[in-house]
Every structure is written in C-alpha cells, then in structure tokens.
Amino acid sequence: MLHFLAQMMYVIGAVMLVPALLAPLLGEIHAVPAFLLPSIVCFLLGLLMKRRAAPEREITLGETMA
C-alpha cells in the first residue's frame, strides 16, 4: 500500500514543479522556493516510501473500485 502512496507523492511533486517553473517567466522569482522546496521533499519522501515497501502483487479491478 505504501508503494501507491509513493507514486502519489511523485505526482504531487511533479505538479508542484509547474508553478516553480512558471514563476520566473511571470516575474515572481520570490515564489520559486515556496514551490521548489516542497516539491523536492515530496520526491524524496516518495523515493523513501518506494524503496521501503515494494508491492507484493498487482491490485485487482475489484480493489480499485472499493
């Protein structure tokens, strides 16, 4: 189960990179650390979770619908 949470952390980290990349283009340089640092933390937490708990098996369709 931790493996799926790790994947979600990767997605959250990637989504938080979007404003960090757009802020300099819009003249908001001071806002970059506010998005970049949490994004890095999300990626690192996702990496730790993924290494800690690999999935034992694939989830079934019934489990995804629950």
Image (cartoon, rainbow, N blue to C red):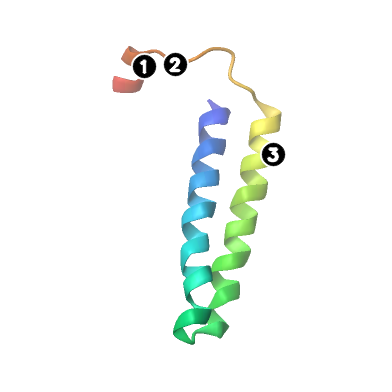
Residue 42, position in %: x, y?
59, 51
Residue 56 found in image quarter: top right
Asked if residue 5 lies left or right of residue 53, the reply is left
Q: Amino acid at mark 3?
A: Leu
Residue for point 70% across, 31% down: 51
Residue 34, position in %: x, y?
56, 72
Task: Determine whether the residue tagged by mark 2 lies in a helix, strand or loop.
Answer: loop
Residue for point 47% across, 63% down: 18
Q: Which residue is mark 3?
A: 48
Residue 43, position in %: x, y?
62, 49
Residue for point 65% across, 25% down: 53
Instruction: Please report contact status of discs 1 and 2: CB closer than 8 Å, yes or no.
Output: yes
Q: Which residue is mark 1?
A: 63
Task: Determine whether the residue tagged by mark 3 lies in a helix, strand or loop.
Answer: helix
Residue 38, position in %: x, y?
58, 61
| Mark 3 Cα shell of 10 Å, populated few (<14), some (14-19), many (≥20) | few
Q: Which residue is mark 2?
A: 59
Mark closest to the chain's N terminus, 2 or 3: 3
Using the numbered discs, state the Cα–Cα distance from disc 3 to disc 1 in whole angstroms.
Answer: 25 Å
Residue for point 59% across, 66% down: 36
Q: Tell me if residue 22 comes above or below residue 51 in the rendering.
A: below
| Mark 1 Cα shell of 10 Å, populated few (<14), some (14-19), many (≥20) | few
Between residue 53 and residue 17, name the one nearer to us. 17
Using the numbered discs, state the Cα–Cα distance from disc 1 to disc 2 in whole angstroms.
Answer: 6 Å
